[in-house]
Image (tube, rainbow, N blue to C red):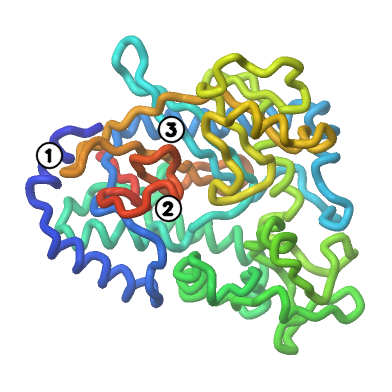
Amino acid sequence: MVPWLRESFNRRFTAEKYARFLAALDAAAGAHIDFRCLESPVFFPKPLLDKMAGYGRELVEQLQANPQYAAASDRTIPSKYLVPNEPGHPLFVQADFGLVRTAAGEYEPKLVEIQGFPSLYAFHPVLANQYKASYDLDPTLNNFLGGLDGGGYTSLFRKAVLGEHRPEDVVLLEVDPFHQKTLPDFLLTQKLLGCRIADIRDVEKRGRKLYHEGKPIERIYNRVIVDELERRHVEFGFHFADELDVEWAGHPNWFFRLSKFSLPWFQHVSVPVTKFLGDVETLPENLDEWVLKPLFSFAGLGVKVGPSREEIEAIPENERGQYILQERMDFAAPIATPSGATKPEIRIMYIWDAVLKPVTTIIRTGRGKMMGVDFNKDLDWVGASAGLFVE
């Protein structure tokens, strides 16, 4: 997408440089990166990133201005996960876009998903910096949005996670955090902010207070995915619906409120046609042009690209409201690599700071049907990457 940067990188690339990059990234993160990282950063024209950042903000504002949506999204939160004291906005937002080619030959973003949940805020700047250092790239290449630099980004992230509390009174909460693929992000968050990493199974409740290893918890940076709690039948010592004397950095209710459930409600140029499966009276003739997605799942679990009629009809009538049917986009593959053209999925990451502020990106790339690891096995020049641009 920035041809001169791409051509220059590909020309100077060697397998030895990539090996050094991976080793240095592991060392910087403090743990082995257990997911594939692309051989290269992805170079973007800044106006395209700005367009995506604007689209994501418009989408969130559209939902906030819709009282019908607020009432409908109430019903998406199971009673046992309905957390009191919900703020009127999400603290963290992720908007994922693919790119389609217009008739004029330009790239136009199309929404893939939107989430009111944290992502790899500590890992991404380290990834971007390691690309620049390992490959001796122009140090002025930027990876921060919203007019931020590294210092401004760190300050904003610290404020979002810690609030007004001491680092030792804040925990990053996850299920079995030291065995998650996202462990490098957890370790870097701890190193950057000084907060503790806590397994939800090690948290105990005393009255209205929560404790970890005998120390009180004043604020929780919530990284717990409800799907995993349910799938693994995780038992822990408190209930999300309890009235607790604790603050949430990333209130859990927004995991449900801003999700795939939001997609059918949008009226926006960036959003493909999307319907709740339960509202579809007659299935489309050509299902190859549609994608079936469960409302609440991560990492592509349960997603069917071009589902069969039999797969859809096998879903019980009373469960069809838990799925969406979305128009399939023919996403462009504008990244020229030695192994062929590769598709990017661009995650615009936001932090709420009086308004919803775009702060940086995470890039996933692939040549399979979807971006997940399972769809790109045994391929090179695919995986997680950093988005860099020239001001």
Q: Nearer the viewer, residue 199 or 215?
A: 199
* Residue at position x 42%, y 53% in the image: 373
Q: Is residue 294 left or right of residue 128?
A: right
| Mark 3 and mark 2: Cα distance apart in space | 17 Å
As displayed, is residue 376 above or below residue 263? below
Task: Say the numbered circle drawn on residue 235.
Answer: none
What's the residue at 67%, 40% (across, down)? 294
The answer to whether 197 appears left or right of 251 in the picture is left
Residue 7: which numbered mark, if any?
1
Q: Amino acid at mark 2?
A: Val
Q: Between 347 and 150, which is closer to the camera in this rendering?
A: 347
| Contact? badges 1 and 2 (CB < 8 Å) | no
Question: Which residue, given by chain and number where applicable, does mark 3 sit on?
Answer: 98
Relative to the observer, which residue lies in front, 377 or 164?
Answer: 377
Q: Nearer the viewer, mark 3 or mark 2?
A: 2
Q: Secondary structure at mark 1?
A: helix
Disc ID at residue 373: 2
Specify the farthest residue to the top: 103
Confirm whether residue 293 shows in the render.
Answer: yes
Amino acid type at mark 3: Gly
Discs 3, 2 touching: Cβ within 8 Å: no
Dot 2: element:
helix
Say which residue appears at 26% left-offset and 41% top-offset: 43
Which of the two discs, 3 and 2, labels the residue nearer the N terminus? 3
Mark 1–mark 3 Cα distance, whole angstroms, equals: 22 Å
Where is residue 281? Give x, y as percent.
Answer: 76, 17
